[in-house]
Image: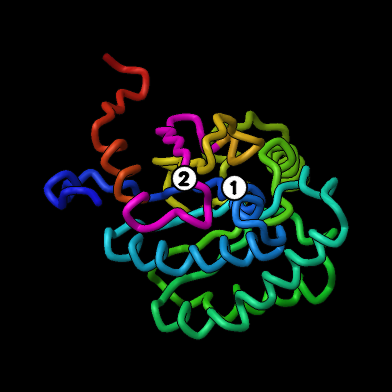
């Protein structure tokens, strides 16, 4: 456990991204199925959200399923969709009571109809909430988001004009959310894996060996303590 004095009242990251890695390895260590590992990973989300709310974090983006994950075994993918539906069936009322707003980053086009409907219903049910933004990145890829945003900008441009960062950002999935201040990747991997590439420009990166199902609020606090030790100069001296 950390010493409470180590975690300072500020700066607190406004927007935290998490690459939730290690469910399969966690399951292998315990000699259980990968689907059980994913379920354990889903259970780690709620206490993390409670801690984020208590700390005053404004948004959390969770990398739940990448565009590259489609190469996984079909049974595992189907199990992930079942788990997503199970998660919202059992957690949505608690999410609503905590004033959490659900958002989605990624393409809905390839998802099963029932999964698409589940996501849309969760977004609609929490659209008026003004607490923590919980952004599920499902069927998401950073390069794909940038290409999509550029094509959206082109289709909305009536007259020739120069594109700017501010104009471009209006077409990103994360438009309206705070800049990404902190990225956490679990399980000891040191890769970005096509996650929020545009948003990562000035983000502080923290990597931890903890497998995602074992990631507890204390691990979030440790990551924020590391973040608070950094000097963010944004190209200055």
The furthest residue to the top: 237
Q: Which residue is more in the foreground, 115 or 58?
A: 115
- Contact, CB < 8 Å: mark 2 with mark 1? yes
Residue 5 percent coordinates (x, y): 12, 48
194 vs 184, left or right, is right
Establish if 45 lies above or below 140: below
Label ID, residue 210: 2
16 relative to 34, above or below: above
The boundaries of the magenta stretch are: 199-219
- For the residue carrying disc 1, how many other residues have a C-alpha within 10 Å: few (<14), some (14-19), or many (20+)? many
Relative image position of residue 67 (x, y in whole percent) = 76, 46
Looking at the image, is 83 positioned above or below residue 144?
below
Q: Using the rendered image of the protein, determine whether residue 142 is visible from the camera's viewpoint.
A: yes
Residue 62 position, x and y percent, is: 55, 54
Q: Which residue is mark 1?
A: 22
Label 2 CA crowd tier, 10 Å (few <14, some 14–19, many 20+): some
Asked if 208 appears above or below 217 in the picture, the reply is above
Which residue sits at x=70%, y=43%? Answer: 141
Q: Any magenta on residue 47?
A: no
Residue 180 place in picture, x, y as percent: 45, 43
Q: Which is nearer the eye, 29 or 49?
A: 29
Q: Name the residue located 60 percent from the left edge and 50 percent from the top edge.
A: 29
Q: Quadrant of the C terminus?
A: top left
The image quadrant of residue 187 is top right
Residue 137 can be seen in this image:
no
């Amino acid at each position: 456990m950390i010493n409470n004095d180590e975690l300072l009242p500020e700066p607190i990251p406004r927007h935290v991204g998490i690459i939730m890695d290690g469910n399969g390895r966690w399951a292998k260590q315990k000699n259980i199925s990968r689907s059980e590992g994913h379920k354990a990973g889903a259970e780690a989300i709620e206490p993390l959200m409670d801690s984020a709310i208590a700390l005053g974090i404004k948004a959390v983006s969770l990398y739940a399923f990448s565009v590259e994950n489609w190469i996984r075994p079909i049974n595992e993918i189907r199990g992930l969709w079942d788990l997503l539906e199970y998660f919202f069936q059992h957690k949505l009322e608690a999410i609503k009571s905590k004033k959490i707003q659900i958002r989605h980053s990624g393409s809905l086009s390839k998802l099963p109809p029932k999964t698409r409907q589940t996501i849309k219903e969760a977004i609609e049910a929490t659209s008026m909430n003004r607490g923590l933004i919980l952004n599920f990145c499902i069927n998401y890829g950073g390069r794909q988001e940038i290409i999509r945003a550029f094509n959206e900008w082109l289709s909305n441009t009536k007259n020739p004009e120069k594109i700017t960062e501010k104009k471009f950002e209006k077409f990103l999935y994360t438009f309206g959310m705070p800049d990404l201040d902190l990225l956490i990747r679990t399980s000891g991997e040191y890769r970005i894996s096509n996650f929020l590439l545009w948003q990562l420009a000035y983000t502080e990166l923290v990597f931890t060996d903890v497998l995602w199902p074992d990631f507890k609020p204390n691990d979030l606090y440790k990551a924020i303590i590391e973040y608070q030790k950094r000097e963010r100069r944004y190209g200055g001296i």
